[in-house]
Amino acid sequence: MIVMKIRTAAPAALLAATAASALLLSGCAGTDDAKADTGGASKLKVIAAFYPMKFVAQQVGGPHVKVTNLTKAGAEPHDLELTPKQVGSLSQADLVVYLKGLQPAVDEAVKQNKPKHAVEASKLAPLEEHGTEVYGAEDEHAGHDHADAEHGDPHVWLDPTRLAAVSTGVAESLATADPANAPDYRARAADLVARLNGLDGEFTAGLATCARKDVVTSHAAFGYLAERYHLNQIAVNGVNPESEPSPARRADIQRLARDKGVTTIFFETLAEPKTAKTLAQDLKIQTAVLDPLEGIKDEAKSDYFSVMRANLDALRKGLGCS
Ligand SMILES: [Zn+2]
């Protein structure tokens, strides 16, 4: 009875909210709460572990979610350390999107703080074991880096079709967390999947006929991309960009680069490119940026798609594709 009395003042507002929802989301029943006119106060709280997960959560969640990235814009996500505040925030989140093995601190914090819902991306896009070097050159310092070696190569997002699988899974988790908007999450994910498949088509066509297939990179982030588009990755560093190559590994790469007629050493934006640049100088060849998309410095200027297209251009130039 008390509840009914309190509510008597509200019908006009409720009707208005329902009408607004119906206009905004055709096909969505009027069960939606008054998100549209509460200024976002009731948006779903989503925490993403690093940029590609944030990108997917934002694209799929659209106006219904507020996404926070645990990795600062432009910071390198491998082995991220969390502040106590960030750890605590996980228990308040409606959904956490992360990738096991990339950031052990996040894996541990998710386990301890039990968010309401969680998407672990490697369950949607299973990890594979990739050597840091495609040609199997032996070096005990490359690619045997703690969690990475244990869980497999974490860089699944660099194959657009694998990120599409993550997108579909994120939509299902959002739908579970917020059933009122389930049709919208699924529609937004379908749109993202279509765009990712389109990007995959651009890569397939753009890299179909190339003079060279060997991609010398700084850290071993491009294993899935190389696999998808039939390229060979020769990584100077390990799966973790902070690992340093041994003198023997450096000599191996020099020899391979000469043998294969490599014209370009690719380095990335967030990690220190010194080794790659020195190598290019020694070999008297050029350098170019190949961005592993582990973070984006200015998200107003670029996003997953623009960076991937820039990567495709760089690969086409470096590999002499027609
Ligand atoms: Zn990486």
Image (tube, grey):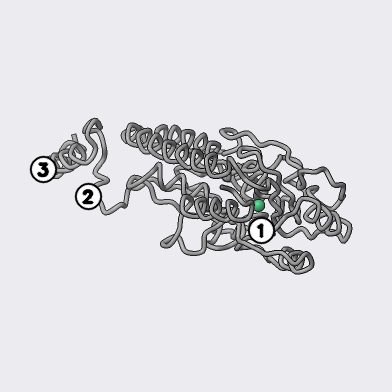
The residue that appears at 68% across and 66% down in the rendered structure is: 272
Per the image, label 2 sits on a secondary structure element best described as helix
Q: Quadrant of residue 263?
A: bottom right
Sooner in the amino-acid sequence: mark 1 or mark 2: 2
- SS of the residue under disc 3: helix
In 3D space, how far apart are the residues under numbered discs 1 and 3 (Cα atoms)? 61 Å
> How many residues crowd mark 3 within 10 Å: few (<14), some (14–19), many (20+)?
few
Q: Amino acid at mark 2?
A: Asp
Can you give x and y, in whole percent of width and height, for residue 322 in the image?
Answer: 56, 47
Q: Is residue 10 above or below residue 141?
A: above
178 or 291: nearer the viewer: 291
Instruction: Kindly identify the residue that appears in the image at 87 percent across and 61 percent down.
Output: 247
Q: CA distance from mark 1 to mark 2?
A: 48 Å
Few, some or many C-alpha atoms within 10 Å of disc 2 (few <14, some 14-19, many ≥20)? Answer: some
Identify the element where label 1 is drawn. Answer: strand
Q: Which residue is mark 3?
A: 12
Task: Find residue 108 and report its horizontal and vertical position in percent.
Answer: 65, 46
Label 3 sits on what residue type? Ala
**Image mark count:** 3
Give percent across and percent down for residue 18.
18, 38
Left or right: 140 with respect to 199?
right
Q: Dots 1 and 2: beta carbons under 8 Å?
A: no
Residue shown at 71%/44% (left/top)?
232
Quadrant that contains the N terminus: top left
Left or right, residue 54 beside residue 149: left
Nearest the camera: 34 or 267? 267
Q: Residues within 10 Å of mark 1 (few under 14, many from 20)?
A: many
Which numbered disc covers residue 37?
2
Mark 3: is the Cβ under 8 angstroms from ligand 1?
no
Q: Earlier in the sequence, mark 1 or mark 3?
A: 3
Q: Position of residue 90 (x, y in %)?
A: 52, 49
Q: Which mark is residue 266?
A: 1
